[in-house]
Structures are given as C-alpha cells and as structure tokens.
Image (cartoon, rainbow, N blue to C red):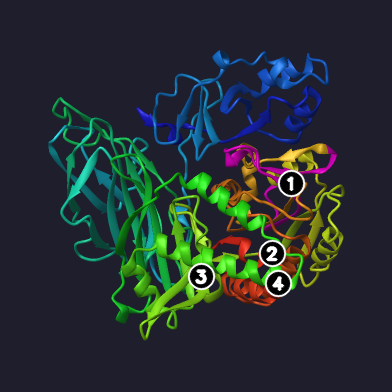
C-alpha cells in the first residue's frame, strides 16, 4: 500500500460548483489537464467531486450555458469523492481527491492513465565552482503499531539510496561536512524518553550510523510523530510518522509506518541569519493549543543551537483571539495628531503584552540582551496565528523596565513555513500586475503607474486583466516570477482558504483556487505581493495572510508579502514604492522590508506594522 501523495497526479483543473457551464468550459479549454475536481461549499464543509476531463466536458457541453456546475452535475454530499490526506495510505484502485493544508493537491483515478510518484526538488545540480554536494536520503524506521505502555525505538539515518514509493524519506542535498540537527517531537500517542535530539554529519565516516530515540506509547489510537531536520538553525524538511497505539503487541518490527514527507531545501543556503527561531505547534493533555520554540544563532560564541523554550500554552482559542486583536487595531481612531499618538501608544502596549505572554521569561531576557548583536531574524513558524512582527522587546535596566522596538522595527525579520522549500534567490524579470479597474481606490491608479514604470533594463511588466479566466491562464503558464495584486480583499468566515480577492465583473479569487494546473504559477518561484483592500472599510484593507501565504508558498512561491489586518490605501501605495525600489536596488528582503516600514511609519497609521513577509531574510533579487 502506497501513500496517497506518491500515487497521485496533479494534472487537474479546479472548478467551483457555482460557476456557470459556459465559464467552466472556458476554463477547461484554457488548460490541458487530464482530470477535473469540482469544489462545492455546503455550510462550513468542503466537498470535492472528481471527474475525468472528458466526463466533465460531456456534461457541460450538453447543459444550458448559464446553468451552475453543481446543477449540471447534480452534486450532493453523498456523491462527493473520497478525500485523503497526502500521507494517508491509498491503493490506486478507486478515485480519490488528495488534500494538503486544506486544498486539493492531487488525485488518484484508475482511468486517468499511468500513475507516477511525486518527484521532489532534491536532485538539483550544484552551481559551478560551488561546494561539493552530496545526495542523501534521510529515513526513519519505527514499528507500525506499539502496545499501550510499551516502548519502541525510532531510528533515524542517512542513506545513499532514494526512498521507496511506500517509504519515501526526505531527499537531502547538502555539502560534505554539513551538520544536520534532528529533533523528534511526539505530538500524539507517544512521549520521548531521554534526549529528543541528535546530529548527523553528511559525508562523515559514521554518517550512516542511525540515531536512536526511545518512545513510549501513552495514548491509544493513531499516533503522530514528527522528525524535524535542521541545518544552521533552519528547517530543511521533516518526516511524519503515524503508528498505531493499541492493546495488542506490534505484529511487525518495523517498516509498516505511514510517512508524510515535507519538501527539502531547494538550494544550499549561502548566508545564515543572525538568529533563527523555529516555532512548533503543540497541544497539552486538555487539547489546548500551544507551541515550543527553538533558538539558534550564527555566532558560535553565543552557544545557541536549537535551544528549547516552552511550551507556551494559549489560554483561549488563538484564532478568535487574534481576529479580535486585529479588529481592535482597525478600530483605532486616527483623525487627529492626538488620536494618532494615543493609537501609537496603544499599539506599543499591545506589543509588550504579546512579547511577555508569547516568550518565556528566560527567552525574553536572552532576546533583550542580544538586541544589539542581532540584525537578521528568521522565524519559521508552524502555527498560523501569531503576528510575531508585533512583539515589542522589553527588559530590565537599573531596576527599571525598559521598552524597546517592535521585532519588525528592531530587526530585519522575515518568516517561513517549516517543511516548505526555502528560495535563497528571487527574480523579478517578468512581473505580473493585477489591479481591478472597479476597485475605486484613490491610489490604485498611481500604484499601477509606478509598477508599469519598473519595466526596462531587461525587466518586463505586464498588466493581467482582473478576471479569473485571465488569471488562470497566466497561473497555468507559469512564466511570471513576480505577482503584484492591488485592490479589495474580503475574509469569508473562519476558513482562510475562502478569503477573497475581489476581481472585476464581481468575480473573485480564493487561495483554494491555487490548485491543480493553476499551481504552475510556482514554477518560477515568484515573489507575490498582495496589497489588497477590504470593501466597506473607508479605504482600508484586510488580507488573510494565513490562507494566502500558505497556499502561494505551497504552490512554489519564493516569497509572499501580505497584511495581517486592514491597511490604509495611501500608506500601502507608498510602502510598495519604497519596498520595490529597495529590492531592485539590491538590498536583501529583510533589510528592504524594514527600511520600507520605517519610511512610511510617519504617516501616522498602523499600516507600517501590518505587513507579514514570508521569505529568507537574506534573499535578494538576482540581477
């Protein structure tokens, strides 16, 4: 039995159940995929329906042009295709839709042609004159099932052989002598006894000697183990194991576990940030959300290599909490200089609150003591809620509490999603610009004029009509290495994948639609900037960075820039000007963003703090 991801194909087109037959046929004719997945939202549940391309076309061509797809295909809950997570087991003899991070990423269909295994990016050739790179496969061996209360050994090792389809492992392409730090996390069903970390050295005489970790089964049901692999404090990938915990002894000693693997690092990192924070989501026995953090510093004299802090537990549900937090920021009155001053102080107080509640005291003291020695900060966070940019440094000096700067003000900081391939180099040789003509925003025309003016010196800038069919064609072509959106956005309910970018003619774009053939947008590892505004908020904007960031990065984007909360149209325009001018002037992303923030801070509104940036802080625009 194989993992669903390895059996799946990704050549499909995603349609919405509410689209008309005419529009859906136009989308099919613009693509070349073999299968069609139809998405239907019923209440707060998502349903998916899988068809071959020919099946879908036959139904749609025979239907009235304006009839919705869900009516044409007579879609009901009981007709929905089975959906599997990417790491779950699949046999290949039935039609299923494969989901990852809440969006369809593939399908298995017995009639869709020869199945193929997913190929990772690990086989890239080294750059001429660069370090000698060694290809390895990191594997984890653990019993498929463990009796409740029993102990079992998890072995983590490097191998020269590629992983088998049923046990793919993690492809590792690193210079000889690279030190890979391994941390084992028991997220459900098990606990680690003893030290949960170890180190493997690529190319060393004993590189194939496995690390051994002892785990004890403590909770019946499906377990959840994660093996996280770091190099120089940055996550290069992970392995996920889901062994069963039951009353019966394990039938097989090893090899039967299901493994879901994340992407390896796309390229070798040339530069290392001053400080790396890895934030890993966790839960306590009562089911409360929380996280642990690991700090690493590039300065060896600081003796910080994956130093663990936490866990920190949320005392309330983090999603609603931060939703209310952003609404409070959006509601700050800013009509006078006095109101702006009060709002600024309010934000500073909230920043102190976040820092003191999200960082354990020992970590607070450490960061305060290092603030003058740190320039670049890279936060890899698996949790989707926390605006780390807003944490405000505080510390004690001469018996008094002193407030410092916000993280994004004090440091050249960026974020990333662990397990997603980091892109150390970006390109803006062909920039796609999407500015709906119907937005009505006073500064949208100026923003469009500025962006079009970036053309020249080998750079192309092309305006893409703000219509979904045009966007689908451009996404599918995968030929743009930059995407800039300016207009209105809207959050829809609790699901971040339903957040909308408002297009012309009342059409919309959601993160969910960055699936199937549209995911080809990531072939060029583009920089994506959503400068989007919320309808009905007086020229302010709201972008759901969680849903948009996660889906653009999952599709292969090299960087993503969006806002945590509502932002002001004028300030957003000037921030874009300042940022692009610095990026194209050769500054690394982290420094360019920090300087752009500080340049627009005097505007007096919170926009300068709103942006969240997913990228390597030392990545640059290649010339």
Secondary element at image label 1:
helix
The local secondary structure at tag 3 comes to: helix
Sequence-first disc among 2 and 3: 3
Q: Which residue is mark 3?
A: 407
The residue under the point 60% across, 40% down is 497
- What residue span does the magenta drawing correspond to? 477-505
Relative image position of residue 180 (x, y in whole percent): 31, 62
Residue to which mark 2 is pinned = 428
Question: Does the CB distance between marks 4 and 2 fall below 8 Å?
Answer: no
Give the number of the mark in front: 3 or 1. Answer: 3
Q: How many marks?
A: 4
Looking at the rendered image, the disc whose residue lies closer to the viewer, 4 or 3, is 4
Taking the spot 50% from the left edge, 40% from the top edge, the residue there is 101
Whole-angstrom CA distance, mark 1 to mark 4, is 47 Å
**For mark 1, what is the residue?**
474
Is 486 one of the magenta-colored residues?
yes
Which of disc 3 and disc 4 is earlier in sequence?
A: 4
Disc 3 versus disc 1: distance between alpha carbons? Answer: 36 Å
Q: CA distance from mark 4 to mark 3?
A: 25 Å
The residue at the point 31 percent across, 72 percent down is: 304
Of residue 185 and residue 109, the one placed in the foreground of this image is 185
Where is residue 29? Give x, y as percent: 76, 31
| Earlier-in-chain disc, 3 versus 1 | 3
Q: Earlier in the sequence, mark 4 or mark 2?
A: 4
Residue found at the far bottom of this picture:
398
How dense is the environment of label 1, judged by Cα within 10 Å: few (below 14), some, or many (20 and up)? some
Does residue 89 sit above or below 426 in this rendering? above
């Amino acid at each position: 039995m194989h993992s669903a991801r390895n059996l799946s194909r990704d050549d499909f087109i995603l349609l919405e159940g509410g689209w008309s037959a005419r529009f859906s046929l136009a989308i099919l004719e613009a693509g070349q995929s073999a299968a069609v997945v139809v998405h239907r939202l019923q209440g707060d549940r998502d349903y998916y329906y899988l068809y071959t391309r020919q099946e879908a076309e036959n139904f749609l061509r025979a239907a009235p042009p304006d009839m919705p797809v869900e009516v044409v295909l007579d879609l009901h809950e009981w007709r929905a295709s089975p959906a599997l997570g990417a790491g779950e087991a699949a046999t290949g003899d039935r039609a299923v839709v494969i989901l990852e991070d809440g969006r369809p990423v593939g399908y298995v269909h017995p009639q869709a042609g020869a199945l193929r295994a997913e190929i990772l990016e690990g086989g890239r050739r080294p750059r001429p004159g660069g370090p000698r790179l060694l290809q390895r496969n990191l594997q984890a061996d653990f019993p498929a099932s463990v009796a409740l209360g029993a102990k079992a050994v998890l072995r983590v090792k490097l191998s020269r052989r590629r992983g088998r389809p049923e046990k793919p492992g993690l492809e590792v392409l690193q210079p000889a002598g690279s030190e890979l730090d391994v941390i084992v996390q028991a997220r459900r069903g098990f606990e680690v006894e003893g030290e949960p970390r170890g180190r493997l050295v690529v190319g060393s005489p004993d590189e194939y000697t496995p690390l051994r970790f002892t785990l004890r089964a403590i909770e019946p049901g499906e377990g959840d183990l994660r093996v996280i692999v770091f190099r120089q404090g940055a996550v290069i990938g992970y392995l996920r194991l889901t062994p069963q915990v039951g009353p019966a002894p394990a039938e097989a000693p090893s090899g039967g576990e299901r493994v879901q693997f994340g992407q390896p690092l796309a390229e070798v990192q040339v530069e290392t940030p001053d400080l790396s924070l890895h934030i890993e989501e966790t839960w306590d026995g009562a089911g409360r959300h929380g996280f642990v953090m690991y700090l690493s510093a590039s300065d060896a004299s600081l003796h910080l290599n994956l130093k663990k802090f936490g866990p920190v537990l949320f005392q309330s549900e983090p999603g609603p909490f931060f939703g209310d937090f952003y609404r409070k920021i959006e509601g700050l009155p800013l009509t006078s200089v006095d109101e702006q001053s009060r709002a600024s102080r309010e934000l500073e107080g909230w920043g102190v609150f976040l820092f003191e509640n999200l960082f354990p005291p020992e970590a607070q003291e450490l960061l305060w003591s290092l603030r003058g020695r740190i320039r670049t900060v890279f936060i890899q966070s698996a949790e989707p809620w926390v605006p780390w940019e807003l944490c405000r440094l505080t510390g004690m000096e001469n018996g008094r509490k002193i407030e410092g700067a916000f993280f994004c003000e004090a440091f050249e900081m960026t974020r990333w999603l662990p397990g997603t391939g980091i892109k150390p180099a970006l390109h803006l040789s062909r920039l796609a610009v999407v500015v709906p003509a119907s937005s009505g925003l006073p500064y949208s025309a100026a923003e469009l004029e500025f962006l079009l003016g970036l053309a020249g010196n080998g750079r192309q800038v092309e305006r893409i009509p703000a219509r979904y069919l045009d966007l689908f064609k451009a996404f599918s072509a995968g030929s743009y290495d930059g995407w800039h959106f300016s207009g209105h956005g809207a959050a829809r309910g609790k699901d971040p994948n339903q957040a909308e970018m408002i297009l012309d003619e009342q059409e919309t774009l959601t993160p969910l639609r960055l699936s199937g053939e549209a995911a080809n947008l990531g072939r060029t590892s583009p920089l994506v900037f959503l400068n989007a505004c919320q309808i009905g908020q007086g020229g302010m904007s709201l972008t759901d960075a969680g849903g948009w960031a996660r889906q653009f990065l999952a599709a292969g984007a090299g960087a993503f820039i969006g806002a945590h909360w509502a932002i002001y149209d004028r300030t957003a325009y000037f921030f874009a000007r300042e940022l692009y001018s610095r990026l194209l002037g050769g500054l690394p992303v982290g420094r360019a963003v920090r300087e752009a923030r500080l340049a627009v801070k005097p505007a007096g509104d919170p926009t300068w703090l709103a942006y969240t940036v997913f990228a390597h802080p030392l990545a640059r625009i290649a010339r």
